[in-house]
Amino acid sequence: MEIKPVTLKDIAKALGMSTSTVSRALNDSYEINENTKKLVVDYAKKVDYRPNPIALSLKENKSWSIGVVVPEVANNFFSMAINGIEDEANGCGYHVVICQSHESLEKETQNVKHLATRQIDGLLISLSGKTTDIGHIMHYSRSPYSVVFFDRVPEAGNYHKVVADNFKGAFEATDYLIKAKGITKIAHVTSPPSLSITRERLEGYKAALEKNGIAVDEELIKYVGFEPQDAYDTVNKLIAEKHPEAFFVASDRLALNCYEAFSKHLHYSEKTVPFVGFTNLSVSHLFNPKIFTVVQPAYEMGRNAARILIDSIESKKKVKEFEMITLETKLKFE
Amino acid sequence: MEIKPVTLKDIAKALGMSTSTVSRALNDSYEINENTKKLVVDYAKKVDYRPNPIALSLKENKSWSIGVVVPEVANNFFSMAINGIEDEANGCGYHVVICQSHESLEKETQNVKHLATRQIDGLLISLSGKTTDIGHIMHYSRSPYSVVFFDRVPEAGNYHKVVADNFKGAFEATDYLIKAKGITKIAHVTSPPSLSITRERLEGYKAALEKNGIAVDEELIKYVGFEPQDAYDTVNKLIAEKHPEAFFVASDRLALNCYEAFSKHLHYSEKTVPFVGFTNLSVSHLFNPKIFTVVQPAYEMGRNAARILIDSIESKKKVKEFEMITLETKLKFE
DNA sequence: TATTTTTGTGAAAACGATTGCATAAATATT
DNA sequence: AATATTTATGCAATCGTTTTCACAAAAATA
């Protein structure tokens, strides 16, 4: 049953013309006689001719595919972001190749190299937790304009970036705990300080404390790696040693791990110790004890990142500029 | 900074030989002199030569990519399955192109056609909720051996398939409710009957009832569409009219929607009315009231499906056979 | 009617790789 | 020394398109 696709040559032979004529007819070239055109177009439709995109790619040096590197796919934030990326890219005729760095720099480097070899037209990337510099990424990209960083972005340098307003989101969450709940001793559990999101959210947290005249207690701030056990231990230790009046956990996966430990301390969770997480879990409102969330516009971030990338790929302009988009987070505190 | 990749021709020119020699040297052909080989290989490494996969694809009529069509990416089961697919495929040098049908037959047809046009070497697909026949899928595939169905598979016909043991999973869950909890009035809320998973899980549910000498009450069995509101209404109605002693919801997304309505009926959920869902939510154990789950081996299903597909693509054998793999589910009832 | 212009078409090169075939040079065999 | 064989390399075709160039035939102009 192996079906062999129809080629230009097949059509040319069947119609007794040259491939050039057929090609031009299908591309509606002005040079081709209307009758010939109609003949070709009708026949092509009849045999369900579809141009071989691989041949086109070779000719045009364009793969019509964009690469995506994220730490994990099975993560609410990233799967929703990928959703947005797919929608935007597919709508523009691109397809999307996804790779996972699993928070490893080596894997991330491999991914980027593999994608480059695959002739992607551009790259969307959210950095791994171990990444501190982006030489390996820029080295394999066609140009600095064919890379868009999202969520976890490099600090310095001119690049396309799409991020959530992490500072503001963290500020508002913290401010709310202080203002509405009258809480001052808020633990902040966060990801490695190498990540942009870590620093920005921490700054938001600190700013809210300071604005409300509360001294920052460094012992309430904990950096945690990506092992679930680290999260459990950290929460248990915080509870034992510091008795925080609220928890604010700064990233998606981390929040769930911390929550797990938190929810086991019944004397804590059953009292009104609010638990806030920067997370995109769609079912957070079903948790009990309650989990308050700072929600990132994941889908929109993905969609915007893809939009910028495609614009940049397709722009013929010599003089380009880097775009930076910051999207608002939303408190889900009901 | 636009970097142009090094080609065979570039190397040939630089080294004053023909592209054929360079190609053969890099492919370690026995015909090439060892000195020449070394010269070429060293130079290639120096300039970071990487063969253009698009040119290779064109030559070999092989894209080294496989297509995946699922109803939704942002769904625990599917994102974990995709995880398995990616791992297996990437390990074998393939990349993966993902499309979402959003439970629509039209979208599914578009996706399959688009992927076919993209020259994919094979297809992994989990059918949309509206799909009742697979003509549109087989029409666009290279051969029936280059398609693997997983999770939601067509009933009849010889095809590659990877599924969970839905019957057994549903049977065990139901049997447990009866045996361990002494419950007889169990509501079964499920997806459209066109889906294989719906029918198999329903059969498991019924078989467990019958084995325990409980008559099947058709009014306790509800088919629900994909709108969240349908799920809410169904649960509310069931509670109002039938007062079930337990809920068993047969699919991932559906279970969460039903649970949402269920958890609002405090007089219900606070009593010991068990809620069971066929779901892969990683955080189900954090829910309160408790949610019991029948967990599918999503990662393994994806991995196996990709494995079968790639074996089938790469097998040179003329005589092939269809593979059917059934993996065990796991009760998370602690 | 002779010349120019327009119109429509085909041959061939290009994209980057592989590979069957031809062939020159080096070596082995008689 | 003459022939046969091996070794190492290059030429050219191929995969499916697009596109430049060339060039007939037809139409328009002189």
Image: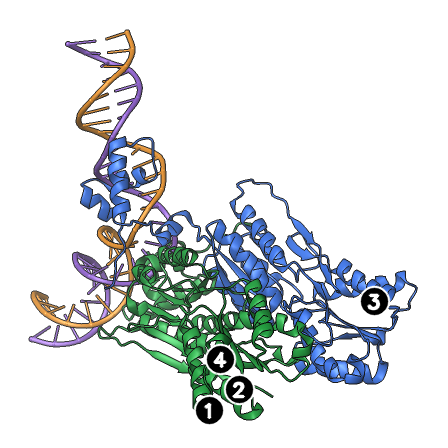
Chain colours: A green, B blue, C orange, D purple
Q: Element under label 2? A: loop
Give left or right: position of A138 versus B176.
left
Give left or right: position of B25 versus B259.
left
> Residue at point 29% right, 32% down?
B32
Q: Amino acid at mark 4?
A: Pro
Q: Amino acid at mark 2?
A: Thr
In this figure, which residue is indicated by the disc labeled 3? B177
Q: Element under label 4? A: loop
Front one among C29 and B51: B51
Q: Are marks 2 and 1 in contact (CB under 8 Å)?
A: yes
Packing grade of label 3 (10 A; few <14, some 14-19, many >=20) is many
In this figure, which residue is indicated by the disc labeled 2? A184
Q: Chain of mark 3?
A: B
3D distance between C-alphas at marks 3 and 4: 40 Å
Determine which of the numbered discs, if any, sits on residue A212 in the image. Answer: 1
C15 is higher (above) or lower (below) than A312: above
